[in-house]
Image (cartoon, grey):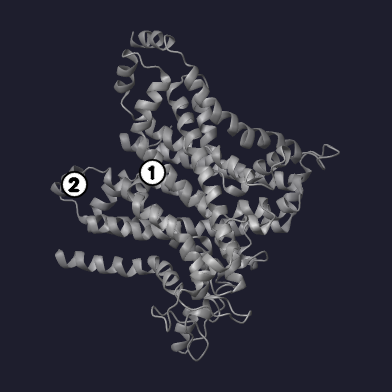
Amino acid sequence: MKRKRLLLFLIVMCFSLLWIGPLVLTVINSFAPITKGESDTISINEIRDKDEEGFTEISFLLEAYSLEQYEEILIKTPVYLNMFWNSVIITVSVVAGSVIVSTLGAYGFTMLRFRGKELLFLVYIVVMLLPLQVTLMPNYLIAGFLGIENSYLAIILPAVFNPFGVFLLRQQMKVLPEECMEAAKIDGAGHPQIFFYITLPMVKSGIAALVMLLVIEYWNLIDQAIIFIKRIEQYPMSVFLARINKEASGISYAAATFYIIPVLALLCYGHEYLKEGIGLMNVKGR
Amino acid sequence: MPNVSRKRHHRQYAKAFPVFALSISLFGFSIFYLIPFAISLVYAFVENPVQMNFVGFRNFIELFQNKFFILGFKNTFIFMAFAIPLSMISSLLLALALKRLGRMGNLFSVIFLIPLVLPSATTVQFWMGIFADKGVLNGFLHRFGLEGPSWLAGSYTMGVMIFIYIWKNLGYNTVLFLAGLHTIPEVYYSCASIFGASRWQRFSHVTLVYLTPTFFLVFIMSFVNSFKIFREVYLMQGEFPHESVYLLQYFVNNTLLSLNYHRLVSAVYVLTLVIVLVVVIAFKFEDRFSENLSD
């Protein structure tokens, strides 16, 4: 029995190397000196070793270590930091707005009783399940109508009102013990007090999960930016990273590492919340 | 009786706050999703948005005659038909393994979540290094005297995309399955053992049966997430992809950028209809199964 578990452990460990590999290689290669490559090769070939036949080889050790790449993106060329801030602005606005709208919306859905409520919630769920390319169409039309099609608002506002957050938090509010609310009412608390002092503290973990899922989604956004943002200096770094890779300017690994750090820190810190959030969808809301 | 007292109770409470709370969300949801979506239906039945000539179903007929739409539809369908079942099976296996590993399994589940947070550009950079013509994989094959194919522009391209999809979503689905596995009481297993069930029987009669709601959920999430693979495909293949990975999203993006409204809207409505249909069928299946479960 023990031996079998050890075997299982080793198998899973071998597999997990493939899942952690891209991260490790990116971080290691970010400490390589900058090599301006010929334009006909893809950037991955330039920094990693090649064997005599010209095939890419994976090596976990570099011939030389330097901070040149970091110097380039952090100090010499301010455009990279600019892109980073673009991403921060978009993600923080989406997260802040969405948390406010979703907690309130979920509270309304939990507390109110009216005809057609469940039908309305079903509409929320259906829109939540539609792929981005489908919801981009109404987003695009309304952005043109409101005249915000070339600004971040065209990305941020639809994201803030995306039904996903309402769905996730309602799932959690639904299972809160009713006695707490009843007790608060008897003590003379109104709805605002119940919301701020009872419901919000009780769904803290749900909010944390929502924040994690939103950050993952919008830190890496690509499609919306391609559609709505026309000026390159306004691109978030997620789109710009792809450009850097293509230009093969030799700094893509440091740029990627720098960009990964915030989300990776969030994953390490909040993975329990993330799992709880993913698990929350398991409680069916119908 | 309790119903009456509850009603009276409610009347005493000013509902202004919850009404206000819900209306914020509802207002934005209507403005950015519902209303434009509803209004755009008009576009699907007119020749162009300026003149508003009613043309009936011609836009839809033209859509189904458009060879790029058909190609995109076909490729997206093929992608899902392979990617979703394979992804579900592999994540179930991993979840079972991680559950047996206990606390260690918990640590591993974080590692398997890493691809979820990696920027798509980084993911793509790594896998291009592996699958490029002069990439790691072909270098490996070369050592054994084999000539590797062109993974990223040929008949294997779809397979590579399916692989990357599975790789990326494995952690997410595994966490869903783990959550589902933890809801099955241990008693069921010991009960089955007492009645002499073999390990396979315990798996097929207890685990699989009580995981039905989770299967449903993982299917829905995999279906939704399978549209997101477009990010990676787009970054790998650029604006002009290999024919076999011309996904529906390419078609939608291109019509959006070329401002071809009536084609865009009719395509979006067809797609929405298909998605709602899939979800409704999945819900129905799930209802049928959970009825059996409670019997």
Q: Residue furthest left?
A: B194
Name the amino acid, label 2. Answer: Ala
> In this rendering, do the residues under marks 2 and 1 share a single chain?
no
Instruction: Please state the chain letter of the residue tagged with numbered disc 2 in the rendered image.
Output: B
Residue at image x 35%, y 44%?
A: A276
SS for tag 2?
helix
Residue at image x 61%, y 54%?
A: A223
Camera-side residue: A197 or B266? A197
Residue carrying label 1: A277
Horizontal side of A186 relative to B18 (left or right) equals left
Residue at image x 15%, y 64%?
A: A2
Corner quadrant of residue B253: bottom right
Residue A270 percent location from the top left of the image: 35, 49
2 vs 1, front mark = 1
The label on residue B127 is: none
User: Is the residue B44 above or below the residue B252 in the image?
Assistant: above
Residue A20 percent location from the top left of the image: 38, 66
Quadrant in which the C terminus of chain B appears: top left
**Number of marks:** 2
Camera-side residue: A94 or A131? A94
Residue B187 percent location from the top left of the image: 18, 43
Asked whether residue B231 is in view, the answer is yes
Name the amino acid, label 1. Answer: Gly
Residue carrying label 2: B192
Corner quadrant of residue A141: top right
